[in-house]
């Protein structure tokens, strides 16, 4: 992939993903019990551990996205994997709200829906950035 202006949108969006994922993950790690009680009390005693586990996963994901974003030439394959992971997050959020909304509080539903919407916007800009970067190189995006 090319460097410079052709990867600007992609790198910026990947770094926004890093920041959002890292902040969300750290908040889940630090406040897992409080967040579980406030957002998903229907999970019972497992809630805090599930929230903290999800937070740990987000911290690792943020690190991997950061490694891709800071590379001299971000790999198309790696960016595709990030996009797929983000799409899966949105799909899992929609599924959770559709099939397990009874476990969430009203605030929990709002938080899950808002986070899914933010991640969906990130996906759109990651894809646009990837298309621009690859087009500048003279190849079609697979």
Image (cartoon, helix red, strand yellow):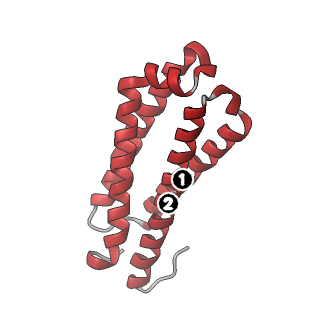
List the residue tagged with mark 1: 117
Single out the residue that lies furthest toward the front.
Answer: 106
**Left or right: residue 25 compared with residue 85:** left
Front-most of 76 and 125?
125
Residue 7 is left or right of residue 94, and the answer is: left
As helix, strand or loop, the secondary structure at mark 1 comes to helix
Q: Residue drawn at (38%, 47%), measured in percent from left and top?
A: 20
Q: Residue at x 37, y 45 (%)?
A: 62
Q: Return the residue at label 2.
A: 121
Q: Residue at x 73, y 36 (%)?
A: 99
Left/right placement of residue 34 relative to residue 2 reads: right
Q: Residue 28's spot in the image, x, y percent?
A: 41, 30
Provide the secondary structure element on which disc 2 rests.
helix
Dividing the picture into quarters, in which one does residue 55 lie?
Answer: top left
Viewer-proximal residue among 12 and 31: 31
Q: From what the image shows, is residue 142 above or below residue 63?
A: below
Spot occupied by residue 27 in the image (x, y as percentages of width and height): 37, 32
**Circle number at residue 89:** none
**Where residue 140 appears, x then y in whole percent?**
51, 81
Residue lying at 61% horizontally and 43% vertically, measured from the top left: 93
Compared with 14, 32 (above or below) is above
Quarter of the picture containing the C terminus is bottom right
**Residue 108 versus residue 139 in the image, above or below:** above
Q: Residue furthest top?
A: 45
Tally of numbered tags: 2
**Which residue is situated farthest in the right direction here?**
99
Q: Nearer the viewer, residue 10 or 140?
A: 10
Crowdedness of circle 2 by 10 Å Cα count: few (<14), some, many (20+)?
A: some
Image position of 16 with respect to 129: above or below: above
Q: Residues within 10 Å of mark 1 (few under 14, many from 20)?
A: some
In contact (CB < 8 Å): disc 1 and disc 2: yes
Q: Where is residue 51? Give x, y as percent.
A: 49, 27
């Amino acid at each position: 992939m090319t460097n410079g202006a052709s990867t600007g949108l992609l790198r910026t969006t990947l770094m926004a993903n890093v920041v959002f994922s890292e902040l969300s993950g750290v908040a889940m790690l630090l406040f897992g019990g409080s967040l579980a009680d406030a957002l998903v009390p229907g999970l019972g005693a497992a809630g805090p551990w599930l929230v903290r586990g999800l937070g740990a996963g987000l911290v690792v994901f943020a690190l991997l996205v950061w490694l891709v974003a800071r590379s001299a030439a971000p790999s198309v394959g790696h960016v595709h994997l990030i996009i797929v992971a983000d799409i899966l997050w949105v799909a899992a959020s929609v599924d959770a709200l559709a099939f397990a909304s009874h476990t969430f509080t009203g605030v929990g539903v709002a938080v899950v829906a808002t986070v899914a919407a933010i991640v969906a916007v990130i996906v759109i800009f990651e894809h646009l950035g990837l298309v621009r970067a690859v087009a500048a190189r003279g190849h079609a995006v697979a």
